[in-house]
Image: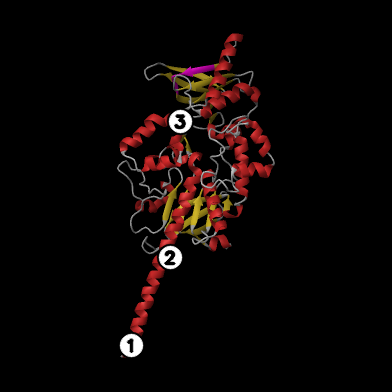
Amino acid sequence: MSDRERDIYDVVGVGFGPSNLSLAVALEESRSHGGERGEISSLFLERQASFGWHRNMLLPSATMQISFLKDLVTFRDPTSSFSFISYLHASGRLPQFVNNQDFFPTRQEFHKYLEWAQARVADRIAYGSEVRSIQLPSGTTPEQSDLLRIEVADTAGRNRRTIAARNVVISTGLVPSMPEGAERDDRVWHSSEFLEKYRRMDPRELRRVAVAGAGQSAAEIVRFLYDELPHAQVCAVVPSYGYSIADDSPFANQVFDPSAVDDYYFGSHETRDAFWRYHRNTNYAVVDDEVIRGLYRRSYDDEVQGDRRLEFLNLTRVTGVKRVGTETRLSLQRGPDAEVRELDVDVLVCATGYDAMEPTGLLGDLDRFCLRDEAGRYRMERDYRIVTAPEMRCGIYLQGGTEHTHGLTSSLLSNLAFRSGEIVDSIATRRAERDAETAALASQVGGDISGAVGTALQG
């Protein structure tokens, strides 16, 4: 048995994307800075064999939709050695990046930054490790144990081990969502697997491809396929009347500020509703202006040349998918009352978004100690900890799946640095409180024993 398996950790992270990477960095910096809180021991478990963040959407020239300053650390600590600026300096590209005069690096470069950061905390990460369950130690109740028992298997399923933790931070990411009636196969893809599936194909076999969706990923894939397949027809199946522009104006962007989380969390029902009603177009089913204009220019040039290779099927949804010979036949409906038409394609790409992270399956029997609101959603503390029954002594934190309590930034990079810092502070504070209670109890027991001994001696 290894040291990792024998140890009890203050916190175990489940999943290792940017959110828990930022948490690992915050814990590393907390340890480096020292102070009264002491070291918080940690381990992060990731089922992938190596670090990867939306690898299949690292399209050429695709840029980030947030400023490079919204990296893993800068909003929490601008002097951190884990910042994007520090990465550029270490890579010898800082002057060149500045000369670029651009706040938005390519997605490929930002991914390289994340890989650089994770390499510096690699000793705390166990890749190829899938968490099967989180539960209390056998034969105990929440009052009897301040530990959680985490069952882990390697991704091949051959070796299993158990890890103990006082807190868990679940960040398993969003779940790909497909249109009703569409199942993924070698010719029907979700955007989350796009590049991997595309590279397996012979481009010459792709004569007609369709992309369903109205957001940034859909538009970027349409652009990529149009440019990469000059012989093919590309059909964009868009449920709205064309793509809608993302609102990234200064005032709208304030909804991603750290202070906006407090406004949302402590706000009234009307306040929360206003956030979504007025500012949903900052992130959901919207596309950057530059991408929209580029696609429109391509479509217009096609018309000028009399070759409509790029086709937009607006107000249209995919309502069914079936295989017909070597082709994939789509059922398309334009509006709720329109007739269904069929379209044969070589490949359908569904850039149809994601469902929120749902940790219920991982928590198993522990879920009954997690309190829910009237809509059946987890009640959450401000520090991203699930509100649990009073007898539960361990902490269960979520990074994602908290849009209903913390607002738009729940699963976004924008508030990454602050969110991870708040979780570290919460874990440290709760540990200090537990240690103080233990010391007080020990002191009381010691006093009772001393008193009893003194009484016996007097007798």
Give neighbour class at mark 2: few <14, some 14-19, many 20+ (Cα, 10 Å): few
For badge 2, the amino acid type reads Asp
Measure the C-alpha gap from mark 1 to mark 3: 74 Å
Q: Which residues are magenta?
A: 311-317
Give neighbour class at mark 3: few <14, some 14-19, many 20+ (Cα, 10 Å): many
> SS of the residue at dot 1?
helix
Does the stretch in magenta take in 312?
yes
Measure the C-alpha gap from mark 3 to mark 2: 44 Å
Q: Mark 1 or mark 2: name the one nearer the start of the chain.
A: 2
Residue under label 3 = 282
Q: Nearer the viewer, residue 79 or 181?
A: 79
Does the stretch in magenta take in 178?
no
Q: Main secondary structure of the magenta part?
A: strand
Measure the C-alpha gap from mark 1 to mark 2: 31 Å
Residue 179 in sight here: no
> SS of the residue at dot 2?
helix
Q: Residue 312, how many percent across, how many down?
A: 51, 17
Q: Most extreme residue toward the right, as rendered?
A: 92
Which residue appears at 60% of the width and 48% of the height? 81
Residue under label 2 = 435
Q: Which mark is residue 456?
A: 1
> SS of the residue at dot 3?
helix
Q: Residue 332, how many percent across, how many down?
A: 45, 20
Q: Mark 1 or mark 3: name the one nearer the start of the chain.
A: 3
Q: Mark 3 or mark 2: name the one nearer the start of the chain.
A: 3
